[in-house]
Amino acid sequence: MDEGSFSRVGVVGLGTMGAGIAEVLARGGLAVVGIEVNQDALERGRGHLEGSTGRAVKRGRLTEDAQREILGRVALSTDFADLGDCDLVIEAVPERLDLKRKVFAELDRVCRDDAVLATNTSSLSVTDIAVTTGRPTKIVGVHFFNPAPVMKLVEVIATVLTEPDAVARVAALVKGLGKTPVTIGDRAGFVANRLLFGYLNQAAGMLESGHATRDDIDAAMKAGAGLPMGPFTLMDLIGLDTCLEVLDAIYAESRDRRHAASPVLRELVTAGLLGRKTGRGFYSYDASGETEGAADEGAPPVVGIVGVGPLADALAALCDRAGAQVR
Ligand code: CAA
């Protein structure tokens, strides 16, 4: 089977992840049907799609014609019946099992019998979703990473019930979209989150215990470990509610204290401070999404150097070049 075995793909839920997935599919030349619960949510989804492709146009990565073509491939609707002729539907609604089961019951009803149904869940069991449908052999997980248009990895999850052909077709589709598929079984955290969240949670624990500041931990991992973002910037990007859900799910399976969510994370989620999407998490963001009050903003830092000699001179020159005030 090749990626050409799917030509019309539905996406249910057009939040950050769903809209990103719809964009990836449309960029890959597929006809996409995007579904949301109501007109307001649909307009927000349209906004995500226009914003993300618009950013690519501004950066000179996409022509306006190509943007129009991509957006033209995405049909938006609030009616599940419009998914009737899709070969594959990817669900990306909020991470609640009752909600996902409801969506899958509806998909089961409106989709062709041979259609493959996929969930983008990052914390729920794909098997739990599959067993409530009338077609458990055709249920897979397709786990994209945030931001979906940028991140290359897509985890393709097979339950013990999934037919191998459905998994192979979805993995081929992912590859055809220019992404890297990794095919795995249904275990909490799959591969990437199982490893990543032990680290993110430990960063939150280090902040909690006063081991280092938010900015210093972020700076250390960015400058010292070559990561594109420090752990707090990344958690804010992922969404602290999602981080907590992922950690709770992994902990429920692993019982490993590395995955026992740090209290500060739970506290922020309870307070509704969910990261970028709510304007505040570990950092605060202005309306354009820029970070406010991070360490590298505002007045230059003042560095005092005690002592004289070549080393002190070299240090002073280094700090001066980095924009610090040297005393
Ligand atoms: N949508 C579309 N494109 C985006 C984007 C978005 N939300 N954010 C950034 N981009 C694009 C930019 O347009 C830019 O594209 P070009 O190079 O083609 O011009 C490129 O990404 C780089 O963006 P920026 O220059 O603005 O910023 P950056 O260099 O700091 O990169 C980043 C931003 C790609 C997000 C980068 O910081 C990064 O890779 N961070 C780590 C992200 C990560 O680890 N994600 C996984 C989280 S775990 C997860 O998602 C799983 C889960 O289940 C929770």
Image (spheres, rainbow, N blue to C red):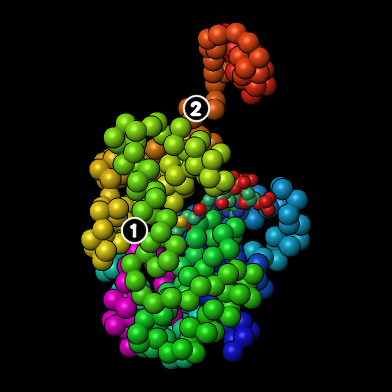
Give x and y (percent) for residue 23: 59, 64
Quadrant for the N terminus, please.
bottom right
User: Marks 1 and 2: in contact by CB < 8 Å?
Assistant: no
Q: Which residue is mark 1?
A: 246
Give x and y (percent) for residue 64: 75, 56
Relative to 145, is 37 on the left or the right?
left
Q: Residue at x 39, y 68 (%)?
A: 190
Residue type highlighted by circle 1 = Val
Residue 142 is inside the magenta segment:
no
Q: Which residue is mark 2?
A: 295
Neighbour tally class for label 1: few under 14, some 14-19, many 20 plus, Cα within 10 Å = many
Relative to 162, is 102 on the left or the right?
left
Whichever of labels 2 and 1 marks the residue nearer the N terminus, that label is: 1
For the magenta stretch, what is the residue range? 117-134
Residue 131 is inside the magenta segment:
yes
Asked if one can make out residue 3 in the rendered structure from this viewpoint, the answer is yes
C-alpha separation, residue under disc 2 versus residue under disc 1: 28 Å
Neighbour tally class for label 2: few under 14, some 14-19, many 20 plus, Cα within 10 Å = few
Give x and y (percent) for residue 171: 54, 78
Asked if one can make out residue 32 in the rendered structure from this viewpoint, the answer is no
Q: Residue at x 28, y 45 (%)?
A: 262
Q: How many marks?
A: 2
Quarter where residue 110 is shown: bottom left
Relative to 132, is 224 on the left or the right?
right
Is the CB of the residue bearing disc 1 within 8 angstroms of ligand 1? yes
